[in-house]
Amino acid sequence: MSTHPDQAAIRAAALRIAPHVRRTPLLQLAGTELGIDNDIVLKLEGLQASGSFKPRGAFNRMLSNPLPPAGVIAASGGNHGAAVAHAARALGVPAEIFVPAITGAAKRARIEAYGARLVVGGEAYDAARLASEARAAETGALLVHAYDQPEVLAGQGTVALEFQEQAPDLTHLLVAVGGGGLIGGMAAWYAGSGVQVIGVEPEACPTLASALRAGRPVPAPVGGLAADSLGAKQVGALMFAVAREHVAGTVLVPDEAIRAAQRRLWDAARLPAEPGGATALAALLCGAWRPPAGARVGVLVCGANCDPASLAG
């Protein structure tokens, strides 16, 4: 596999992981239901196994490599860890997941429910990542990176393959950005298609915006409502090579817009979305991104691992 996934690598990943992941549905919502001018199409990756898009990349990484007796190791704010733990259980190997202290109790419980060993490795994701890499070197376990491995990007790109098959007339696609594996894989699939892929980031976690401004991945602030899922310190090198060529731009949204998007999804469609899962929609609802005339807009709702009580009110 090349370091930068192309359509052939993404198609191969889709075939490889098909027995283990769900083909998630779309939901069309009228703009009047959301208080905006445009009708939109949502892809509901919160209905994916383990509650987010992450099993796609986890399974592709694990099925593309020999699995050692020590099993697999990953660092995660929560969703990737749950996905790796789920994949490891399905494939019959042990998993050890390092999470930062900011990871919520619900996500920790989900990781442990899949049978993984949970380790708290520092205050933020980057500390957990360093701890996981040291542990992998010690044990010989296969490291499953949250976003910066070719197999992971190709696996996440299968979201775009499905989206294009299900909604071939899209002109614009809004995708939340953390470490960038999801948007990197999706932009690689849509490269040259004419579909504009737009990254949406919390103001408190501007990883891709900072990288594009600097011309390379650089450390960015980590904080705010969505830090447990979008709180990578900087974007991955592999996704950045894709993003600077094939991502049409990025927009930043405040935490209050993310919370409002969560509540709008719940009120309009009874869809639970964690803060990171609602971030892409927040760009439309708060006006941070305005679609041009005639646009046919798709929005990825990428995760649903939240406390349902947080959606009330």
Image (tube, rainbow, N blue to C red):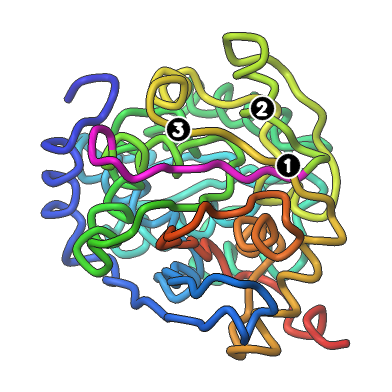
Nearer the observer, 124 or 232: 232
Which residues lie in the magenta part? 191-202
Q: Amino acid at mark 2?
A: Ala
Residue under pointer 3: 247
User: Residue drawn 47% across and 35% down?
Assistant: 147
- What residue appears at the point 60 percent right and 15 percent down from the top-left corner? 217
The image shows residue 24 at horizontal and vertical percentages of 33, 73
The numbered mark at residue 252 is: 1
**Of the residues under marks 2 and 1, which one precedes in the sequence?**
2
C-alpha gap between disc 2 and disc 1? 8 Å
Q: Report crowding for label 2: few under 14, some 14 to 19, many 20 or more residues within 10 A (C-alpha).
A: many
Q: Amino acid at mark 3?
A: Val
Q: Earlier in the sequence, mark 2 or mark 3?
A: 2
* Residue 295 placement (x, y as % from top left): 43, 58
**Residue 46, position as x, y percentages in the image:** 50, 71
* Residue that appears at 80% across and 67% down: 259
Task: Using the rendered image of the protein, determine whether residue 68 is visible from the camera's viewpoint.
Answer: no
Q: Nearer the viewer, residue 24 or 60?
A: 24
